[in-house]
Amino acid sequence: MGARLVVVGGGISGLTTAYRLQQALPDATITLIEGDDRLGGKIKSSTFAGVEGLDEGADAFLTRVPSAMNLIAELGLTAQLTSPAIGAAYVWWNGMHSIPEGLMLGVPTDLAKLARTDLLTWGGKLRAALEPILPGTGVGADSVGRLIRKRFGKQVHERLVDPLVGSIYAADTDRFALTGVPQIFDLANNNRSLLLGARAARRKAPPPSGPIFAAPRTGMATLTDALASSLRTSGVTLRTGQPVQSIERSATGWLVDGEVADAVVLATPARTTAPLLNALSADAANVLAKFDHAGVVMVTVALPGDSWPAEFRQRSGYLVPKPVQKWVTAASFASSKWAHWQPVAPDNGVILRISLGRDGRDVTDQSDDALTRAALDEVSRHVGFELQPTEIRLGRWPMAFPQYRPGHAVRVAAIESALARDAAGIFVTGASYHGMGIPACVQQANSAAQLVAKFVANVRN
Ligand SMILES: Cc1cc2nc3c(=O)[nH]c(=O)nc-3n(C[C@H](O)[C@H](O)[C@H](O)COP(=O)(O)OP(=O)(O)OC[C@H]3O[C@@H](n4cnc5c(N)ncnc54)[C@H](O)[C@@H]3O)c2cc1C
């Protein structure tokens, strides 16, 4: 008889783990158990303003980390991919300012280009210009914010790096691990000057041509739907609406809410994973229970096109730095960013995706009314006229983004070694551990499936 395997959690991490397990162990009996009524986790696409598959959560993935592109290709979805039509964005700092060119996640790599921006004062630019001559700081306290302020000063941190990195992870970069942003970590770890290091790296290996982001035209859920459909076809059992309550030891392995398993993969957020492990590995559970997750809200609006300024049609959206932020952290000019997201009506209308909340400012417990009012009032102030939406959709994402606090890598290593010692055959994977972007989740799922296959092979020999 083949191995009996259970995957808990049906987001991209759990679905990909089950898919890879099925490939590696075709004789295994695999069950995936999802607590929600639908599969996909933070990936969800639905019809809005007549546009089918308009994403409510993640709307794209990085192409330069190959794992997601490879999975897309295996599922036969490559021909369905599209990429943002526009990349250029603004920072709102009491008015719209173009993001300067020559940045790497907000880190300046070109002082001449930085000098041209009106987002920083001359004092801020001069302070940034000192960076190449400062003595090395190394990776220091494993905090993105502390490193960037030390190297480039307060303005580069609060007007560029914190909004750019913060908007990707809903993070407060002062409390976010440098190891969680590998591009900046590597620069700091390998160079005295981040600016000179980034410039040298670009000279050595110019960024590959082609789009940086991609998504299926029919929405990101095309990917999770294709995974689910492939799993069903290959005989994997997919159960929804059944949040796993307990995992116990059995004579031969594990019982997941009574389901027998030789190995279990928990592809659930860290904080929800903790109680499942309390009785099995107190050390792993204690570390997991201390994780913070930032909740966000996405308000999507359709607007008549006649009021929308022509120059905004050339931009993908804007970011709001914390010193001038209330609840809105960013707004994506979604129908400019994605050419296929043109609302069906009114003519030439536009769609905005407005993000509210972040680490340290969780707004997910606010009423629909308060959230919608905040989104419309704040964005009206930012763009300089009153928004009059023809359609509004509000999506809540509690515990959306795990927060990689300084020391994150050490904590993840501690969880993994405690599990290997106390509960061999139980594995964790997903956004809480080694990267939260979709390619990183796919990559981790690939590795989790390999670990399970190795474990099963060892147990059987
Ligand atoms: C608004 C938003 C926008 C984003 N934009 C992007 C983007 O553009 N690009 C990008 O790369 N990433 C983006 N991300 C991040 C990315 O989408 C997520 O990090 C990733 O999808 C997480 O996948 P996961 O499977 O690890 O976790 P999840 O998607 O959280 O899946 C975990 C699943 O476990 C289930 N679960 C929890 N507890 C239990 C239980 N006890 N029993 C059974 N099931 C349980 C949950 O219901 C959930 O379905 C975004 C995230 C959000 C919220």
Image: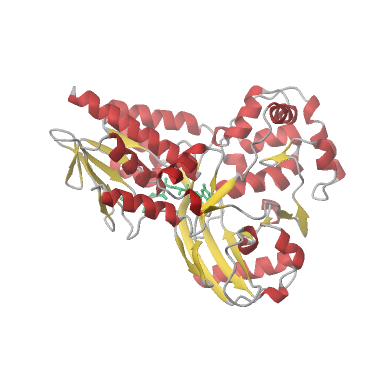
In this image, 401 relative to 136: left or right? left
Q: How many marks?
A: 0
Seen at 28% across and 40% down, the residue is: 22
The image shows residue 405 at horizontal and vertical percentages of 52, 38
In this image, 389 relative to 306: left or right? left
Seen at 21% across and 38% down, the residue is: 28
The residue lying toward the viewer, choosing from 30 and 91, is: 30
Q: Name the quarter where the N terminus is drawn.
A: top left
Residue 167 visible, this angle: yes
Seen at 43% across and 56% down, the residue is: 222
The coloring applied to the image is secondary structure
Residue 359 visible, this angle: no
In this image, 264 relative to 112: left or right? left
The image shows residue 209 at horizontal and vertical percentages of 65, 40
The image shows residue 14 at horizontal and vertical percentages of 35, 45
Q: In this view, does 401 lie above or below 281?
A: below
The image shows residue 351 at horizontal and vertical percentages of 60, 67
In this image, 93 relative to 63: left or right? right
Seen at 17% across and 35% down, the residue is: 2
Q: Is residue 375 above or below residue 306?
A: above
| Quarter occupied by residue 172 | top right
Q: Name the quarter where the C terminus is drawn.
A: top left
The residue lying toward the viewer, choosing from 405 and 346, is: 346
